[in-house]
Image (cartoon, rainbow, N blue to C red):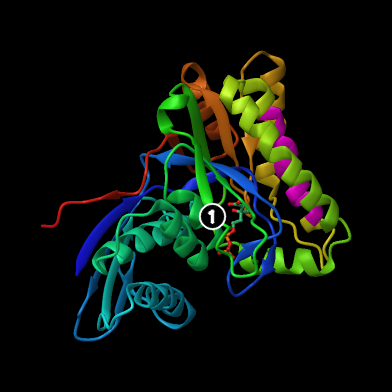
Amino acid sequence: MKATVRAHPNIALVKYWGKRDEALILPHQSSLSLTLSPIHVTTTVEFGAAADHVELHGHVAKGSERDRVLRLLDAVRVQAGRDLGPAKVVSRGDFPMAAGLASSAAGFAALAVAGRQAAGLPADTRASSILARRGSGSACRSVQGGFCEWLRGEREDGEDSYAVQRFDAGHWPDLRMVVAIVDRGEKEVKSRDGMKATVETSPYYPAWVKDAEAEVPRARELIAKRDLEALGELCERNAWRMHSTSLAADPPLCYLSAATLGLIQHLREQRKKGVPVWFTLDAGPNPVLLTDAAHEVAAEALARACGAVDVVRCVPGGDAAFQAEH
Ligand code: DP6
């Protein structure tokens, strides 16, 4: 009745931005991401507790935060088809929550895998991915390691909308992702609200959907070839297009700060000088740099020279994994 799972966050190389179903969290387009190690979230689920209790990163969760967790566990109860009793959930991350990386993605992936195990359900990456998706869309891509593609699916019930692993973490061990924290503040508009406003008000949104869907197979091919330069160009293009469609929302959504733009400018100059470094950017000001092992120190130095207050160097990460109970 108890299980502990550790999962890594992921960074989208082709972003998910916009839902066609808010309740089930079904996207308008497919996306593709890389799981990041060593940063991770560890989540323990125990059914049969005295009362529902949700503890996230050292504090007792309340309101919508708590509801999202308990709703996911309700879905586990339905799958188990039996009364499992109240649940105790304790989740903790090893990276700063404002790091700009979706800690919720790792958290919900760990919660889904641990929840199913604690309920006595068999290990099933597809079922866990669908479950994680219902907590937070991007979480469906953190159930497995390496490069994962979230297939948008067609069905209204979402049973064909889940992530599949295209390449495992060992496919490209030389790849590096360097998270540059230029701004520690909480973002003004959360991804969930930002993407909703974009879907509803941006005239560029249909173009975004079509383009992003077409970029996924291209990114897959470049990853297969381990073509860093072409993948870097694709990532930047996709990030710019996600931000462009958001800037065109009404009112406009701008996630970029002066520090973000300064870093991007500097990165381009370095690239002209032969440093192989590209960036991607989620719905926040902190860029994630793509480079190779030989240039990760240079990428970190570049970020720090542009005022990054913190830098996290990552390598391709593995699957969500069970941890021994103490
Ligand atoms: C910009 O998965 O956090 O990071 O499904 O509403 O929980 P919800 O949103 P979330 O959005 C992530 C958006 C993104 C791009 C991405 O990770 O693909």
Pick the front one: 227 or 176: 227
Pick the front one: 257 or 15: 15
Picture layout, residue 220 above or below residue 68: above
Residue range corresponding to the magenta coloring:
232-245
Label 1 packing within 10 angstroms: few (<14), some (14-19), many (20+): many
Q: Is 279 situated left or right of 299 in this image?
A: right
Task: Please say whether residue 299 is visible from this viewpoint.
Answer: yes
Q: Is mark 1 within 8 Å of ligand 1?
A: no
Counting every numbered tag in the picture gives 1
Disc 1 marks a residue whose amino acid type is Tyr
Image coordinates of residue 297 in percent, x first then y, are 47, 23
Picture layout, residue 225 above or below residue 177: above
The dominant secondary structure in magenta is: helix
Image coordinates of residue 293 in percent, x first then y, are 46, 20
Residue at 45% over, 54% down: 126
Image coordinates of residue 92 in percent, x first then y, are 31, 60
Image quarter where the N terminus lies is bottom left
Residue at 43% over, 24% down: 173
Give the residue number, with chain letter if any, for mark 1: 162
Picture layout, residue 301 above or below residue 113: above
Q: Quadrant of residue 54?
A: bottom left
Image coordinates of residue 267 in percent, x first then y, are 66, 28
Pick the front one: 125 or 203: 125
Image quarter where the C terminus lies is bottom left
As for residue 296 lying within the magenta part, the answer is no
Ligand 1 image position (quadrant): bottom right
Residue projecting furthest to the top = 274
Q: Quadrant of residue 45?
A: bottom left
Residue at 77% over, 65% down: 199
